[in-house]
Amino acid sequence: FSPSDATVIFVLGGPGAGKGTQCANLVRDFGFKHLSAGDLLREEQNRKGSEFGDMIKEYIRNGQIVPMEVTVQLLENAMKSAMDHENKHKFLIDGFPRKMDQALKFEEAVCPSAFTLFFDCPEEVMQQRLLERGKTSGRADDNEESIRKRFKTFEETSMPVVNYYKEQGKVVWVTATAGPDEVYKVTKEKFAERGI
Ligand code: UP5
Ligand code: MG
């Protein structure tokens, strides 16, 4: 199998917008393979013998974007593995691309995206969710200082990616302020409009 045979939907949204939560719903109902770039980076960070562990740790704590070569490679490997071993070829790529260079590189070198699912949520709401989750998540970036940095990176670096795809008519835009069930209901309706 080659990644270019895959169907890829990018899932974007600010930190705590609910990307992971909604991806789990979509996996259950539509059989997508869910690949979270953040999860893959955290796994790589913890992998014994990884040459990138310390670097990834620093970037994540500071809410900065890890150099794209690392992330694109992790995603490509995970896609190949899912295609070869699980016979999955429909992917939700969660939390990626969050910088223009990643978007261009991935679509050129791995696979073009069908569209981007974007969860739009105000910062106050996201902050509250993340601080609540931070009580038990163990995530090194679920603290006030890291959250502030993540929001800044999201606005300055990741929103341009969303707007780039929006200009091409390739964004499914979902307001993500309500509870998880309501957000999912709207997501499913919009997927149906796209023929999914
Ligand atoms: N929750 C979810 N939906 C809710 C709702 N509708 N109402 C009420 N509560 C809701 O949800 C967050 C919390 O909110 C949970 O407790 C949930 O129950 C609740 P979740 O679904 O986890 O939101 P998500 O958007 O996935 O939040 P996450 O924290 O994962 O987003 P980030 O984008 O910040 O994290 P990610 O793991 O993608 O990236 C982390 C870091 O990795 C980045 O900051 C960056 O440093 C690095 N990174 C890269 O360098 N490159 C990449 O390509 C990707 C990541
Ligand atoms: Mg997530």
Image: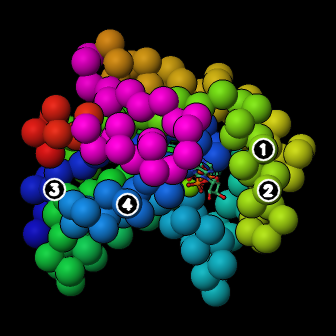
Q: Are marks 1 and 2 in contact (CB under 8 Å)?
A: yes
Specify the amino acid type for callout 4.
Asn
Residue 169 appears in view: yes
Tell me: is circle 4 under 8 Å from ligand 1: no
Whichever of callouts 3 and 2 sits on the residue coming sooner in the sequence is: 3
- Residue shown at the point (51%, 66%) measured from the top left: 40
Specify the amino acid type for callout 2.
Glu
Taking the view exactly as shown, the residue that stands out farthest to the bottom is: 48
Q: Is residue 163 left or right of residue 99?
A: left
Which one is nearer the viewer's eye here, 20 or 192? 192
Number of other residues with Cα within 10 Å of mark 1, as a class: few under 14, some 14 to 19, many 20 or more: few
Residue on which the image places disc 4 = 25
**Secondary structure state at the residue bearing disc 3:** loop
Q: In whole angstroms, how far apart are the C-alphas of marks 4 and 1?
A: 22 Å
Q: Is residue 97 left or right of residue 192?
A: right
- Whether residue 182 is in magenta: the answer is yes
Specify the amino acid type for callout 1.
Gln
Residue on which the image places disc 2 = 132
Tell me: is circle 2 under 8 Å from ligand 1: yes
- Residue shown at the point (89%, 44%) measured from the top left: 145
**Secondary structure state at the residue bearing disc 2:** helix
State the extent of the magenta-drawn residues as a range.
168-189
Whichever of callouts 4 and 1 sits on the residue coming sooner in the sequence is: 4
Q: In whole angstroms, how far apart are the C-alphas of marks 1 and 3?
A: 36 Å
